[in-house]
Each structure stands twice: as structure tokens, then as C-alpha cells.
Amino acid sequence: MVTTENKKIGRKQILTPNPVKKWAIENNIIVIEFNESKDIFEKINKLNVELGVVCYFGYLISKPVIEKFKKGILNIHPSLLPDYRGAAPLEWAILNGETTTGVTLIKINEKFDKGEIVAQEKTNLDYTKSKKDIYENLFTIGATLLNDNLDLYINGKSKLTQQANSDKLAPKLTKQDGYINLLNTDKDMVERKIMALNPWPTTYTTLQNIATYYNLKPLKDMNIKVIIHGISGKQSETIANKQTSTPKVEVELTKVQPEGKDIMSWEEFKNGYLN
């Protein structure tokens, strides 16, 4: 099994194996540690391997490594390919407000997420659940999809389908993707960002942006970064177009976290940071 190296976890920064590596060690499975600067081909080349299975790996696998596996490498990808190829498929599906998602089993090639499709399964995208729960459900579906199609694939009876092109992509997220400008972002988008981008890269704004949105005066450095953990919606008759009586749904912050501080309620934040 190939997986990432131990990472420093917690306040004490203790080197800790990820759950997959821990499970493999407990079950006496050979583990090959990987990072971007480490060539794993030499280690894999020493093994007699027929088939590989990739799940939530996030790195491009080179052609020589793929060719080492006599029957190729299958990948469980948490989207309905060709939609949302890339490193953050569920996150971008949530950001775009999709109502359905799914899992695709592909035979990988040297291009990122562009291999032939072995099988797919669609499911509803439930916005009442956490991103973590949705990902867990998708990979549970993916495990079943793999089991249901493995014998057919190994025996050469799977009908492989070439992927079409799609303009729905899922590139790697950056810290800048988490910025929320309350002045021009509606409530639904703020909610989707909080759902999609936590715990990383987090959703945040600045004290100045919050103060301007609520027409209040900042009491501290206006450039303080404020992470947004929760919101609610409220109806307001105060809208830009005074000639219409249609109420506007405004964003009401409920849980925020000033940079370097603990999470606090909106009332606690307002009392300490706004006038």
C-alpha cells in the first residue's frame, strides 16, 4: 500500500500515521511512504503486482508506475466524471450548488482524472449533512462500486468508456478561495462556502468588511482576519432599491473567530470588536 508519510498532529506536533496507514500496519500490509519529492517507482518495481486501486491520493501517477501494474490501476473518484476532474471535486460541486453528485470508477492513465470509465453511481447532494459525512458516504458507495465491478474488470469483461470533455473542473483550493466579501455575496453562497471550505482553507473576511456590511465602526485593526464558522439568514426591508417592497435575505453571522483567538458568538465578537 502506498500512502503519505506521517504528519505532525496537534499542539505538540507529534508525528502521526494517517488512518489508512495505521490500518495497513495493524493488518500486516506492506506500506510504501510517499511525498512529492520521493520516487516510489523503485520500491513498487520490487513488488509483483497485478492491479492497483487508488482512493483520495491527490497526486499524478507517472506512466512507468502505471505500467508496472499488469491490469492497470483503478481509481475511485468522488464525482460524476468528466464533471469535476481535479483535487477538490466535492468542494466545487457544493460551491456551484449542484443537486446531485456521485462516484466514478476509472482505469487511470498518465493524465489527471481522464482515464476510461469503468462504472458510475449517482446520488443526491444533501446540504443538510457535513462535507465530512458526504465524503464518507461517497467513498462507501465507491467501495461497493469497486467490489461490484472488480471481477468483471479483472476478467476483461468491463465495458470501458472514454470520457467526454467538461467545463466543470475542480482545481486545488487556495486560501484566497475562502475569502468572503459580505457586500457582494448572497446568503446561499456564504453557506455553501462555509460547508465546502472548512476545515481548509477556511472561510474568512476582515473586520473592515464586517463593519462596513453592518454599518458599524471597527474598534481594532480593520485588517484583522476573521474566520466565519456559521451564519443564519434574516429578512430585512432595507434594500438597495427603495422602490420595491420585496424583503432581502441578509447574512447574519453566528460564530466567528478573530485571527489568533478562540471561536466566539456574534454577540461576543460585536461587543469586543465593533461599536
Image (cartoon, grey):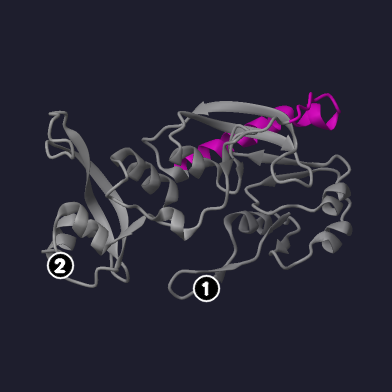
Asked whether the viewer can see residue 200, the reply is no
Q: Which residue is mark 2?
A: 272
* Nearer the observer, 71 or 96: 96
Residue drawn at 83 percent across, 50 percent down: 63
Front one among 215 and 93: 215
Q: Position of residue 25 (x, y in %)?
A: 68, 59
Residue 168 on image: x %, y %: 57, 37
Q: Is residue 142 left or right of residue 14?
A: right
Q: Nearer the viewer, residue 207 or 23?
A: 207
The image shows residue 148 at horizontal and vertical percentages of 70, 27
Is residue 240 shown to the viewer in this render?
yes
User: Closer to us: mark 1 or mark 2?
Assistant: 2
Q: Are marks 1 and 2 in contact (CB under 8 Å)?
A: no
- In the image, is residue 262 above or below residue 182? below
Q: Please name the amino acid that badge 1 sits on.
A: Ile
For residue 180, the mark is none
Q: In this picture, which residue range is highlighted in magenta?
A: 133-162
Residue 232, picture quadrant: top left
- Label 2: few (<14), some (14–19) or many (≥20) C-alpha neighbours in 10 Å: few
At horizontal 55% and vertical 47% (from top left) the residue drawn is 88
Residue 14 circle label? 1
Does the magenta portion include 158? yes
The earlier-in-sequence mark between 1 and 2 is: 1
Q: Is residue 27 magenta?
A: no
